[in-house]
Image (cartoon, helix red, strand yellow):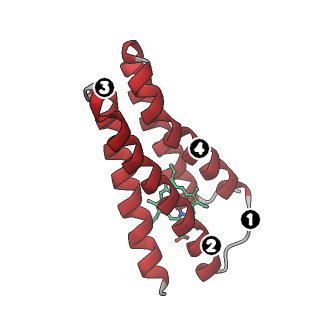
Amino acid sequence: MSPTFYHILHVLALLALYGGTFYAFAAPAETRKGTLMLTGIASLVMLISGFGLMHKLGLAWTGWVFVKIVCWLGLSALGGIGYKRRGAVGALKATAFGLAAVALVMVYTKPF
Ligand code: HEM
């Protein structure tokens, strides 16, 4: 499989995870199972395609990868938290935005 395939898979999974997470913040409680299934699968695909990209592009395990993994962990947990903490939607939205921003800065600048 080409690196382009993994790039597309990675960004597609990111869109699904991000969209599902924001939906979780406002969706009715009965949608919980389906939404968390979607975000769970998207999260897994993101991780696998991330590792696939590292392998295909011959990238080393440097600092930015670990920062991205922390952002990924946080983003993956937010949907489930969103269903439980209805009063914290503002903070959860800001966290989702912040985690994505940090991960994007890491991948496009690779500072360490
Ligand atoms: C919140 C989490 C994450 C976000 C927002 C994110 C986002 C992105 C984006 C936008 C790209 C660039 C795609 C392109 O230019 O076509 C990318 C590439 C990449 N991501 Fe992620 N990603 C995340 C998590 C991860 C994780 C957990 C890993 C590692 C297991 C990973 C590994 C990579 C690698 C290796 C690349 C390719 C870098 C390159 O082309 O030089 N990402 N990511």
Vertical relation: 25 (above or below) 3: above
The x and y percentages for residue 82 are 41, 26
Is 101 above or below relative to 46?
above
The kind of residue on which mark 1 rests is Trp
Q: Position of residue 52 (x, y in %)?
A: 57, 74
Pointer 3 or 2: first along the chain: 3
First in sequence, mark 3 or 4: give its number: 3
Question: Residue at position x 63%, y 51% from top?
Answer: 69
Q: Nearer the viewer, mark 4 or mark 1?
A: 4
Is residue 64 left or right of 49 when viewed as pictured? right
Dot 2: within a 10 Å radius of its alpha carbon, few (fewer than 14), some, or many (20 or more) residues? some
Residue at figure coordinates x 28%, y 30% from the top left: 30
Disc 3 residue type?
A: Ala
Numbered disc in front, either 3 or 2: 3
Respond yes or no on whether mark 2 lies under 8 Å from ligand 1.
yes
- CA distance separating discs 3 and 4: 23 Å
Determine which residue is flagged by label 4: 73
Amino acid type, residue under disc 2 in the picture: Met
Q: Name the residue carrying label 3.
A: 29
Residue pointed to by mark 1:
61
